Image (spheres, rainbow, N blue to C red):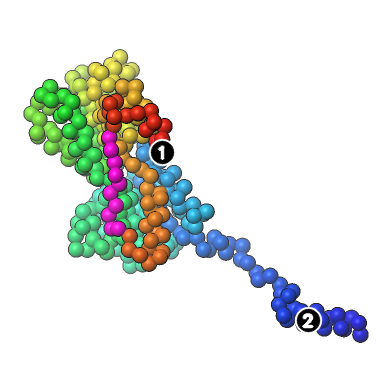
Amino acid sequence: MKIRMILFLLVIVCLLGGCAAPAAVPPDETYEKLIVVGFSQVGAESDWRNANTRSMQQALSAENGFRLIIDDAQQKKERQITAIRNFIHQGVDYIVLAPTTEDGWDTVLAEAKAAGIPVIIIDRMIDSSLATGDTGDQHFTSWIGSDFQRQGDAAVQWLEKQFGEQPLRIIHLQGNYGSSAQVGRTTSLEKGLDRNPHWTLVARDSGDFTQAKGQELVEAYLASGLDFNVIFAENDNMAYGAIDALKNAGITPGEDVIIVSFDANRRALEMVMNGEINFDVECNPLHGPRVQAVIEQLERGETPPRFTFVDETSFDADSLTQQIIDSRGY
Ligand code: GYE
């Protein structure tokens, strides 16, 4: 009787919810709640790129509510197209694309659109007809990056201001052909060459934004006996390679040959400080928090800005301070 009474009481208590078994929590419940972002990254060709990848990893972290899947395309557009198709098949919530070149995105971005996955473009731009034309809205939700021609103009104007009518013999190390960063920076130099008949373009080639190719190209120019007094390198890593080539040949960078570069990574700023780089145009890679903000806006049902141009500056030995170098986030 006693036992029956106890059992009876137990049943009552249980019915009142007191000893209900804890609801089974699927082990991956928190995981399920994360916003899944597929990020097709250009590659790992430069310090800028690596800083950009780190910024994305830090902002789109699990603590911030994201699961980030990164695909490194090794600077190949075909790989990016495959990566985007994989993201669509996996049913990610958002796709972030840092496009290698500007052209060739219409089909795959239309596929993402058909699958209802918002696409955010960072860094370089896609073909301008998709960006601004009538169909532009259909291909991506938001773009965040730099005004590359403005960057190029800053470099050209510095050369004009610094050297006036002096004859310049320029070696031009270009980035990947067809990338907005190359197209914008090259366009500015072209205009500078047109405006300044006393400037000569001595050699021009693509160093693919890498240090190794920058060095290789300048070694080859030196070996062929080219006469030059300016290197216009479309990013810091190619400038580092060029500087190594000059030093190995007993030429003093910053004095015998003027070095103009882009990105303004911390290491490059140190080289501006010690006189090896004469002018460096900032290109900010820290897009992670900006992408996070755009996704959070979309999650709240708001409309993020369609274009976000990042504010940037430039440095020579006169404008640079140790404090700026110390506070550099990349
Ligand atoms: O300048 C270069 C990188 O697209 C802004 O790509 C980017 C460029 C950057 O490899 O270092």
Q: Up-down: is 265 above or below 39?
A: above
Q: What residue is disc 2 on?
A: 11
Q: Nearer the viewer, residue 28 or 218?
A: 28
x and y, in percent, of residue 93 in the image: 42, 62
Compute the Cα span from label 2 to label 1: 62 Å
Q: Is residue 287 visible?
A: yes
Q: What residue is disc 1 on?
A: 329
Viewport quadrant of the C terminus: top left
| Res. 277 image quadrant | top left
Q: Is residue 110 left or right of residue 95?
A: left
Q: Nearer the viewer, residue 187 or 325?
A: 325
Q: Up-down: is 249 above or below 105?
A: above
Q: Tell me the SS state at disc 2.
A: helix
x and y, in percent, of residue 295 in the image: 39, 59
| Res. 329 image quadrant | top left
Q: Residue at x 10, y 24 (%)?
A: 165
Q: Nearer the viewer, residue 176 or 311?
A: 311
**Label at residue 252:** none
